[in-house]
Image: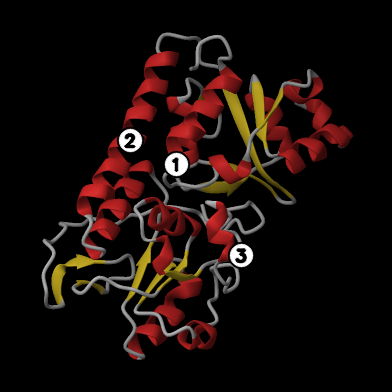
Amino acid sequence: MFFQFRRLRFRFVVLLTLALVACEKKSRTANADLDDFGNPIRIGVAPQRIVSLNPATTEILFTIGAGRRVIGRTEYDMWPDSARLVPAYGGGISVNVEAVLGAHPDLVLLYASQDNRSAADRLRAAGINTLALKVDHIADFRRTTALLGAILHDSARAKTVIDSVDHTLDSVRLATKGKTRPKVFWHIWDSPLITIGSGSFMDELVNIAGATNVYADINGPSGPISLEDVARRDPDFILAGPIGARQIEGDPRWRIVRAAREKRILVVDTLLVARPAVRLGEAAVSLARLLHPNSAR
């Protein structure tokens, strides 16, 4: 997700199916264009005061040149550095509606978690244009970026960002094409033990980087598993953040997993690989370099 791993429910990316509308001078709604809570998407006058309570949308906004319009973010929005200067309004889940209203936004972007449905309803009832999106796949990043470009009346720049990310992803696919695909286990959380399933962009990144997720049979973005089952699936490598890697190395129970015994733990940059946004290409490059150090560029 959204997305240091301290808030696992904040899983970054969209089930949205959009037909983007052209920019117009007067605000309008189209019943066919709905957010992930089923509410109409409004595209009209470009917003000037945006509260973005999703790290993915925050990164997109700054990259397409709308960073100066962002007046609120989550405490997990760490990139780019200038985003850290924006006031934080909690973790992006169970939103403090009163605090957000006090910022007087003309657009609020939420992660479409059920925990945020009430907040979205209250913000809309207060007359605030509110957009709730899930961002769980790379395709959702593309749709979200295109949508924000349309809302901001800068579709050309949004398309440039999408094309740049896609170019890098394609380059990584090419660099690892034909290479042996190691099996990997992605450690997300330790208690309970949680990993990534095929419903996550992180599983897509593993595939692009030339490896296979041993838990691709989990249909959702993530799921709880047992240490014994990890050992049975016998991954060649373990992917983990710095904290997770230390936990695995220091816990003798992990010795039942061959990759842990053999210290085949690859430490990932969680701020890079856990965001389904404009650095997806960089994330794929970083994973490919870990998994295929002699092949990835």
Residue 202 lies, with reference to residue 59, above or below; the image says above
Q: Position of residue 268 (x, y in %)?
A: 64, 34
Residue 241, by quadrant, is: top right
Q: Name the amino acid type tagged 3.
A: Glu
Report the Cα–Cα distance between label 2 and label 3. 27 Å
The disc label shown at residue 142, or none? none
Q: Name the amino acid type tagged 1.
A: Phe
Image-based side of 102 in relation to 160, left or right:
right
Is there CB contact under 8 Å for labels 1 and 2?
no
Labels 1, 2: front one: 2
Image-based side of 297 in relation to 32, left or right:
right
The disc label shown at residue 164, or none? 2
Q: Position of residue 70 (x, y in %)?
A: 44, 68
Between 20 and 297, the one nearer to me in the picture: 297
Which residue is tagged 1? 201
Report the Cα–Cα distance between label 1 and label 2. 17 Å
Q: How packed is label 3: few (under 14 Cα within 10 Å), some, or many (20 or more)?
A: some
Q: How packed is label 2: few (under 14 Cα within 10 Å), some, or many (20 or more)?
A: some
Residue ID at (49%, 82%):
100
Which residue is tagged 3? 75
Residue 216 lies, with reference to residue 67, above or below; the image says above
Residue 109 lies, with reference to residue 171, above or below; the image says below
